């Protein structure tokens, strides 16, 4: 790459090779190259790094613009696209072919996918059905999906187009071990009472792989099906072909992981399923595979064993840990400190996080009430640690934006009974962590001022002598504080909350929060770094 300069004696700036020597070319990948006309500060360098370090994709990607063309059905199964209150998983293609969840449960069916969330089917009574998808104007289609399924020796149906493939012309089916034998997917389509079956070799049972089938019925031969596994072409063996046709496809519903949601139930997980009303090229199939092939982290990680010790609250906000039907987001520490979501919506609040899913708060009326559980109270103790990933949607407010708090009516007093026990927030634009102790003094460790649109990992710790604030794994501020944590009165106390101050019903967070944790001891600097590395 070379820039253009009006001075012919100066060919410009080059990227990836030395224009002067016409050589010294880089053999590798370069991304996001910038030049500033000033000296960046150390903090700015760190912030610039943080905009791209391990920028994980935790929600489904569209891919290059050409991959939108002809897209008539796209089911991501991500939390933001699945409404468990209505039992509907949305079609993100814009065609309105939303799927009805059948026999599925938010507690068992939602699993980490290859790109964002996936749905896991039990092989006995779970399926998804869509309204009729009109493919009657084309004789070329593409079906693509990510699948993680165990090998089974009997017929299981992954997709059926129509409620009776055997009795409807120009319908199709994708199954395992019906006509073909051994490790095969089968693709079949019907016409005029005939069943045309192609066997597609597949040995990826038990792990995530992408399967893409391109069907071009304009080809005047039996070679109408091209198959790809993980973006690579694989051979197709035709069988049960008594004839073929060049007819257009039909106008039928699509059933996932069953035959018409009544038989041939399939066992396994599927993710990012797409149907196109055209034949994708081999290059486009590879592009589609590349959107999900980079080993993204789509669920929250536990980390080293020591990071479980003393963990009394852990809210991942992942789909499998959040029940939109009840409005609960679960504490997976094992202590049962589940949170009640206030005014949050599955369609707007569930977003891609730093690890798995996160929740987006609107800054005016949304939060999570954790109540007043004893395991989140540290009366008379001299240690506590809290952590969270945060990203502000807009400029950080000059007042206070609450990340996590435990307390009741607050008057800046720490005299027993206290009004606040611990608080992680921004205060006048800066990250802040503070505790109330038996010294009867409210102090905070105040750190850097976060910028909008960037992820930060913030940790507050107290050890009986100092409050420490860590940002992105590094110690950012220390303030002396002594004594044991004071006692909340419990008399009508609202207790702990995330994203807002529940006892003042204010100081709302305008941005994203992910992976919130509370520990009943003081995390070491090494443990803070380990936690940061999980999402770094």
Image: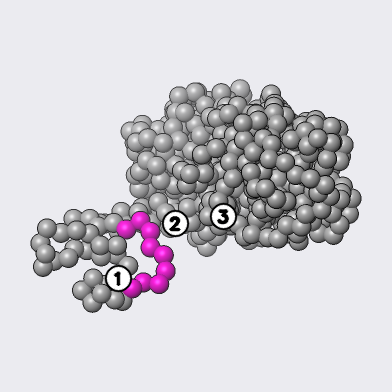
The rendered magenta stretch, by its main secondary structure, is classed as loop
- Who's the residue at 56% across and 37% down the image? 71
Image point 69% across, 24% down: which residue? 86
Residue 226 in the image: above or below residue 266: below
Label placed on residue 282: 3
Return the residue at label 1: 17
Tell me the residue that label 2 is attached to. Answer: 53
Q: Earlier in the sequence, mark 3 or mark 2?
A: 2
- Between disc 3 and disc 1, the foreground one is 3
Q: CA distance from mark 3 to mark 2?
A: 31 Å
Badge 2 element: loop
Question: Quick one: 154 or 314, which is closer to the camera?
Answer: 154
The image shows residue 452 at horizontal and vertical percentages of 37, 40
**In percent of the image, x 76 and y 47: which residue is there?**
187
Query: What residue range appears in magenta?
Result: 25-33
- Of 133 and 317, nearer the camera is 133
- Image coordinates of residue 44 in percent, x first then y, are 30, 54
List x then y, in percent, for residue 36: 22, 55
Other residues around mark 2 within 10 Å, as few (<14) / some (14–19) / many (≥20): few
- Percent from the top left, x then y, of residue 531? 55, 56
Residues at circles 3 and 1 in contact by the CB criterion of under 8 Å:
no
In-image side of 283 versus 310 (left or right): left
Query: Furthest-front residue in view?
Result: 220
In the displayed structure image, the side of residue 164 where residue 456 appears, left or right: left
């Amino acid at each position: 790459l070379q820039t253009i300069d009006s001075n012919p004696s100066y060919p410009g700036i080059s990227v990836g090779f030395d224009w002067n020597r016409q050589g010294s070319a880089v053999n590798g990948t370069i991304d996001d190259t910038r030049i500033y006309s000033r000296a960046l500060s150390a903090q700015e360098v760190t912030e610039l790094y943080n905009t791209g370090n391990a920028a994980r994709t935790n929600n489904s990607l569209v891919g290059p613009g050409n991959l939108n063309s002809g897209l008539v059905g796209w089911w991501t199964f991500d939390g933001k696209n699945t409404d468990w209150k209505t039992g509907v998983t949305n079609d993100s293609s814009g065609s309105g072919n939303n799927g009805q969840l059948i026999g599925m449960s938010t507690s068992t069916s939602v699993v980490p996918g290859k790109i964002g969330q996936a749905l896991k089917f039990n092989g006995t009574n779970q399926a998804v059905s869509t309204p009729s998808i009109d493919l009657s104007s084309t004789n070329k289609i593409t079906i693509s999906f990510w699948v993680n399924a165990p090998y089974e020796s009997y017929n299981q149906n992954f997709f059926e187009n129509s409620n009776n493939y055997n009795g409807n012309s120009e319908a199709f089916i994708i199954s395992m071990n019906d006509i073909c034998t051994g490790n095969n997917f089968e693709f079949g389509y019907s016409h005029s009472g005939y069943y045309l079956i192609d066997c597609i070799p597949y040995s990826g049972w038990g792990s995530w792989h992408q399967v893409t089938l391109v069907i071009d019925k304009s080809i005047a031969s039996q070679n109408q099906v091209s198959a790809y596994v993980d973006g690579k072409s694989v051979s197709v063996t035709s069988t049960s072909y008594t004839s073929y046709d060049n007819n257009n496809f039909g106008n039928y519903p699509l059933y996932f992981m069953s035959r018409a949601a009544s038989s041939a139930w399939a066992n396994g997980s599927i993710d990012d399923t797409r149907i196109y009303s055209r034949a994708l090229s081999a290059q486009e199939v590879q592009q589609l595979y590349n959107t999900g092939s980079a080993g993204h982290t789509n669920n929250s990680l536990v980390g080293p064993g020591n990071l479980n010790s003393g963990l009394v609250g852990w809210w991942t906000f992942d789909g499998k840990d959040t029940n939109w039907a009840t409005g609960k987001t679960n504490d997976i520490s094992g202590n049962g400190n589940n949170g009640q979501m206030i005014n949050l919506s599955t369609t707007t609040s569930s977003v891609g996080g730093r690890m798995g899913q996160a929740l987006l708060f609107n800054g005016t009326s949304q939060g999570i009430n954790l109540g007043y559980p004893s395991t989140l109270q540290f009366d008379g103790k001299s240690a506590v640690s809290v952590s969270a990933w945060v990203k502000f949607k807009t400029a950080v407010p000059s007042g206070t934006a609450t990340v996590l708090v435990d307390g009741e009516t607050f008057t800046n007093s720490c005299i027993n009974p206290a009004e606040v026990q611990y608080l992680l927030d921004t205060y006048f634009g800066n990250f802040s962590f503070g505790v109330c102790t038996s010294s009867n003094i409210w102090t905070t460790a105040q750190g850097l001022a976060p910028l909008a649109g960037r992820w930060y990992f913030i940790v507050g710790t107290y050890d009986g002598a100092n409050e420490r604030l860590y940002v992105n794994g590094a110690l950012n501020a220390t303030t002396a504080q002594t004594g044991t944590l004071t006692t909340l009165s419990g008399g009508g106390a609202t207790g702990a909350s995330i994203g807002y101050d529940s006892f003042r019903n204010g100081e709302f967070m305008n941005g994203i929060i992910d992976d919130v944790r509370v520990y009943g001891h003081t995390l070491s600097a090494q443990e803070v770094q380990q936690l940061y590395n999980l999402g770094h």
